[in-house]
Amino acid sequence: MARQDNQERESEFVDRLVHINRVAKVVKGGRRFGFAALVVVGDQKGRVGVGHGKAKEVPEAIRKATEAAKGKLIRVPLREGRTLHHDVKGHSGAGKVVLRAAPPGTGIIAGGPMRAVFETLGVQDVVAKSVGTSNPHNMIHATIDALSRIASPRQIASKRNKKVGDIISRRDAGAEDEAAVSA
């Protein structure tokens, strides 16, 4: 029974292989090859994690990376279950990313490694830009950093001892003010 529960828990996650790096160690008889895998795991309902695994064989490296990613899941609040609550920036090493909330129907406009994060997270509408590096490790860690900074209106309202309606009504009023100015 425990094995069935474990399989159901694993099946709820979607994993995406982002990058495989082949590394060589030179020894007396020639070269020994190893593999490093970068994997993103998510439940497409607001949880996502990233993992790194190394092994002599590719499948074993992927398995290790997937297990590491499942142990590092973070929860990200999503607006209407499809986009981010607000624009946010993140960085890791030389990698900087800018994530912007988008209206319905926009889709995922993001580079390869970032796209994998958004697909496994369950975001449907987002605009993202990577600035400074194309290294998949830095891009993904910067994206995770940015996502961890997102706060929902409920969290902000509880910090400020206000009602959620006060926070959301200001956001909607700001959009109406912008529309009036641009018209």
Image: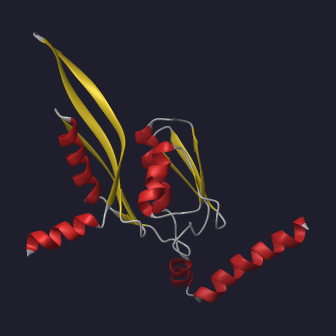
Q: Judge by depth and name the residue closer to the eye, 94 or 81.
A: 81
Q: Is residue 144 visible?
A: no
Residue at the limit of the structure toward the left, as seen here: 1
Residue at the limit of the structure toward the right, as seen here: 183
* Residue 105, image quadrant: bottom right
Numbered circles on residues, count: 0
Q: Position of residue 49 (x, y in %)?
A: 35, 57
Please indicate whether residue 38 sits to the left or right of residue 172 in the image: left
* Screen quadrant of the C terminus: bottom right
Please indicate whether residue 1 sits to the left or right of residue 95 in the image: left
Q: Judge by depth and name the residue closer to the eye, 60 or 51.
A: 60
Q: Position of residue 156 (x, y in %)?
A: 55, 77
Q: Is residue 77 visible?
A: yes
* Residue 44, image quadrant: bottom left
Q: Judge by depth and name the residue closer to the eye, 149 or 42.
A: 42
Q: Judge by depth and name the residue closer to the eye, 63 or 179.
A: 63
* Screen quadrant of the N terminus: bottom left
The residue shown at (48%, 60%) is: 147
